[in-house]
Image (cartoon, grey):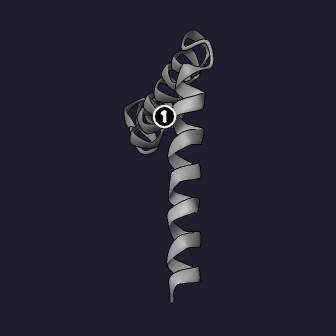
Amino acid sequence: MLICLTKTFLQDESGQGITEYGAVLGFVAALIGVAFMSGQGTLLNSIKGCFSAAASNMTSLTSAS
């Protein structure tokens, strides 16, 4: 009985997919972190500029209506 239970446990692969997705998500998060750190602020400033431009456009649209 113990041998049968052990075989079933070792052959059961449920949950393997979620582990792989977690590993990929961790890898992507690490790459994003490296991109932000190696950009020496230029990437961060670009993103801030995009959000500032979007907010400015929204403000001008609101005041125009």
Depth check, front residue: 6 or 47: 47
Depth check, front residue: 6 or 18: 18
Q: How many marks overall?
A: 1
| Image x and y of residue 33, in percent | 58, 22
Q: Amino acid at mark 1?
A: Leu
Q: Which residue shows up at 40% across the image and 39% down it?
A: 12
Q: Which residue shows up at 52% across the image and 52% down it?
A: 53
| Image x and y of residue 39, in percent | 54, 14
| Image x and y of residue 7, in percent | 41, 30
Say which quarter of the image contains residue 10. top left
Q: Which residue shows up at 50% across the image and 35% down it?
A: 22
Say which quarter of the image contains residue 37. top right
- The residue indicated by pointer 1 is 25
Please say if 50 is above or below 42.
below
Depth check, front residue: 2 or 41: 41
Q: Is 10 placed left or right of 30 in the picture?
A: left
Q: Is 6 placed left or right of 37 in the picture?
A: left
Depth check, front residue: 51 or 21: 51
The extreme bottom residue here reads 65
Q: Which residue shows up at 43% across the image and 38% down it?
A: 21
Secondary structure state at the residue bearing disc 1: helix
The extreme front residue here reads 64
| Image x and y of residue 43, in percent | 53, 25
Q: Is 11 placed left or right of 2 in the picture?
A: left
Please say if 13 is above or below 38.
below
